[in-house]
Amino acid sequence: MTRATRIVHAALVLAGLGVFVALVHHVGPARLAGDLRRFGWAILGVVAFELLIDGCNTAAWRAILPPDSPVGFGRLYWVRQAGVAINQVTPTATVGGEVVKTLLLRPYLRAATSAASLVAARMSHALGQTILVLLGLSAMLRRIGDAADLRGAIVLTVVALAGGVLSFVWLQRRGIFARLANGLPRLGLAERLVARARAAALALDGQLAAFYRERPGAFAASIAWHLLGQLVGLFQLSFILTTLGIPASIATCLAIEAFALVLDSAAFLVPGRVGAQEAGRVLVFTTFGLSATTGLAVAVIVRLNQLAVVALGLAAYAVLSAGARAPNRA
């Protein structure tokens, strides 16, 4: 990472922290603290829901791996947790966690196989999220009333998300990574490194093309598992709101979650979505006629849940990295 990039990341984090402090000041620290005290040990229930969601996402990844893969569900679950934790704590735009997953699976799977499964799983996850947003779109549009600009922005964002994901899947089937590798000589890299990158890109393109051509059912199953995880997230949100004394229907939770996903997607450049995630939840809840205090309380609970899962993921990374190595199949 360059010095300029580090400066930009630091500036975004500081700006996000500033937004969070402003939000706390706006809703009132005492009111926020009161909501969090009332929630108390229910945070363990939120974490339990999150681990169940992670189980669905792991099943989605397992569906994409070769049927004869030697990696069991348990190991894959903790490898995924480790990678997600690395993504959360390092400013690598989700790249670092994917590299960690590939390295942790290297004793069991070829690098091209792991990388292809991660790319395809990322696509199925994005499509699962897009389906959830589409399901919640009608509920969102009914609840935001006459806010024409906001309605238009939501529709355009959903169309852009769906179009972007489907376009990237189409490009993967036509060898996008090899084409990208062909541009590496312009960066002045050594020929040896360029040759290795091209070979890896060709292997990755081959794995992806074969997967999409030969196993469309596995890709559909992966999307279904990711969508199931998103649906479990609706019950997680319902649990949070009910515990805070604000019962909400699953339809309302669907609208809230769909809108929040759109806003989170727009804030992907902010490291950890610090501040942006909290501001987004406040905007969502106030848009649907709920209080800013409730929105910020939910955002803080979600953040605490993320920190707990990150801690588990980092512990998994430490154990898996130090564990015994199986014979290398790369």
Image (cartoon, rainbow, N blue to C red):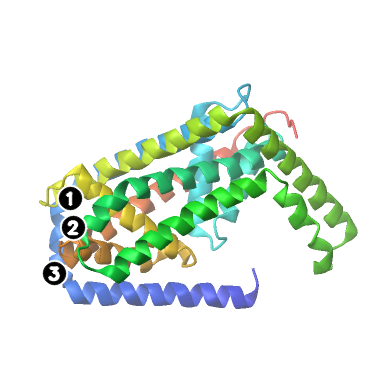
- Dot placed on the residue nearer the N-terminal end, 2 or 3: 3
Which residue occupies 57% across, 73% down? 6
Left or right: 139 in relation to 270:
left
Q: Nearer the viewer, mark 1 or mark 3?
A: 1
Residue 191 percent coordinates (x, y): 89, 58
Name the amino acid, label 1.
Answer: Leu
Residue 72 percent coordinates (x, y): 54, 26
Residue 144 placement: quadrant? bottom left
Local crowd size for mark 3, using a 10 Å CA cut-off: few (<14), some (14–19), many (≥20): few
Residue 70 placement: quadrant? top right
Labelled disc at residue 30? 3
Instruction: Let me know if residue 76 appears in the view.
Output: no
Q: Is residue 90 above or below residue 68?
A: below
Q: Is residue 11 above or below residue 41?
A: below
Labelled disc at residue 36? 2
Residue annotated with mark 1: 241
